[in-house]
Structures are given as C-alpha cells and as structure tokens.
Image (cartoon, rainbow, N blue to C red):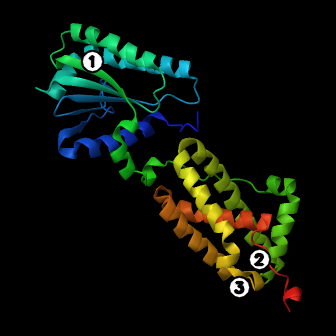
Amino acid sequence: MGAVRVWDGKEWERYCMAILRLHHGAQDFHIVPDRHGGDLGLEAFTQDGCAYQCYAALEPLSTADLYESQRNKLTKDLGKLRHNEQELSRLVGSIKIRRYMFMVHRHDSHKLLQHAQGKVEEVKSWGLPFIANDLAIVVVTDDSFSRERSSLLGIPPPLMDMEFPEVPTSDWAIENTELVATATRKLSFLPSKEMARRYLETLMKQYLQAENVLETMRLKYPDQWQAAERCRAQKEDLLVLEYGAFFDSPSASQILKIVEDLTQDLQRSVPALGIDMARQFSWASVADWLMRCPLDFIPAEAAA
C-alpha cells in the first residue's frame, strides 16, 4: 500500500462537501450543520433522495482495524436516524432517502459492504417516514467522483490547514556545524559578518519550519507534497543553467530572484500552497542549497 493521506474528521467533511456540491449542484444539495443540536446521522442530502455521511478513520490502520472502525461508525450513524426521527422528518420534508451514501477516505474490505447490506432491512424495519422502500446503503470514496475531484486538485488553502511553528535554530546549528559553515562561507559576499550571521539565522529558521511542515504535508497531502518536491528538485537541477552568472558574482538581490522564480513555479505546480506557503518553501530550498552546495559560488579571488 502506498502513502495514505491522514485526514482529521472536519477536514474530510469539508473536502467531501466541496466534491458533492460540485456533483449535485448547489440548488439540489443541502448541507446539515451540526453546531446547533448535534449530529443527526447525516451530513448532507439531496432533492432526489441521496443522504451522505462522511467518515475518515485516524490512520495509520491495518485493513482489519480500518474495517472495524468504519463498521462501528456506520452502525452508530444509522442508529441516529431512528433516534432523531422527528428532527429528520422536519428536516427533509417530503423527500424519501433512497441511497444512504457512506463516504470514507479508504475502502479496503468487502466485509464493510456485507455489513452495509445487512443493515438495510434493519433500517427499513424501523418504519421511518423519510426512508424509501428501495433503500440501499452504498460505500463510496472520492474515487467515485473523479471528475469533481480533478477540479479540486488545487485544493484551496482553508483545506490545507497547516501552520509554521516557531523552531529554535541553536540546537540544530550545533548538530550541523559543517552545513552552517558551508552556508556562512557562501554568504561572505554580504557587506558585513553581522549581516551574514542574521541572514543565515533567518534562512535556518525558514528551513527548519518548512521541513517540519513538509513532513506534515507528506502525511496529510501526499499528492501535493510529491508535486512540490518534484518542482523543487527540477529547479535545483537547472540552477546552473538558469542562474549561471549568479555563481560568478552572487548578491542578495539574485538570491531573491531565485526565491521569487521558485515561488511562482511552486504555485503553478501546487495551487493549494498559496503565495505565503510557496514563498516560505522557496526560502527553505535556497537555505538547503546553500548548505548542501547546489548554490556554490566562485570565491572572489578565484574569479579575479
């Protein structure tokens, strides 16, 4: 099994609602808020009788554990339909629910389908006025909405809920003295040692913050993480070709030029990043290249 995206419940719900709104159209799609009165057992319904409940189990899970978690969630939420009969009757009016869609982030077990089939007759036996005689319980993932998902590949920033926490640089610098020394040498073109020190301190902070966020991104948004890493690697491969003159006579303005170009490349490759996150990743990339040598300058005395 490849990388599994780690969702939290609300994040998965927002993502599903965005896809389903595209699929059904805003005029036929009703989202059921849960802030006032709690969860009624469904998160959305449509005019033509589809009801949706979304669930993302907390990964990592084995196939067996994932099935148990999803089975228990489905059973619990179906029970809420009976418990909240009066509220739901007022909510859906004359609409009859013909398809109860259980939308999960990963579906790996036929046992979940068997469990869903077994619950159909039980739910129908409750005699709920909003349940149709031809009720079916369907397990789906976002793969069932590939066209809508494709239009959301540039996930808007609110769905990529990540923060850049403050990261102390002193301990890291002590453990990585050679990398710091390399970057310090390369920044000697700056007007003073103090300016070079402050410049490097800021670069290290950007680097450490971005690396932490990228690790979170790898777990939660593997597709976007992969696209960002591919973009950064391509830019690194082309540094000498695109910025050859810079290696002969480096300057702070030329470093800024690399950052701005990479920021634009990242935004095109991963629209979900947004401008601020893309720029921070770009500064972190420059810091990495300064320490690892892809940005390696000709010393002034050698160039003379």
Quadrant the N terminus occupies: top right
Give x and y (percent) for residue 111: 44, 15
Q: Earlier in the sequence, mark 3 or mark 2?
A: 2
Tell me the CA gap for discs 1 and 3.
Answer: 69 Å
Label 2: which secondary element: helix
Q: Which residue is mark 1?
A: 81
| Front label number (1 vs 3) | 3
Q: Which of marks 1 and 2 precedes in the sequence? A: 1
Residue 47 position within the rendered picture, expressed as x and y whole percent measured from the top left: 16, 34
Q: Who is closer to the viewer here, 162 or 265?
A: 265
Say whether residue 10 is visible.
Answer: yes
The three-letter code of the residue at mark 3 reads: Ala
Residue 88 x, y percent position in the rendering = 21, 23
Does residue 249 sit above or below 120 in this rendering? below
Residue that label 2 marks = 195
For residue 195, side relative to residue 223 (left or right) = right
- Asked if labels 3 and 1 touch by Cβ distance under 8 angstroms, the answer is no
Give the quadrant of residue 250. Answer: bottom right
Q: Residue, x 16% and y 32% (percent of image)? A: 48
Position of residue 182 relative to residue 123, above or below, is below
Q: Is residue 38 visible?
A: no
The disc label shown at residue 245, or none: 3
298 to 85, vertically: above or below: below
Instruction: Name the residue: 30% across, 40% down.
Output: 20
Amino acid type at mark 1: Leu
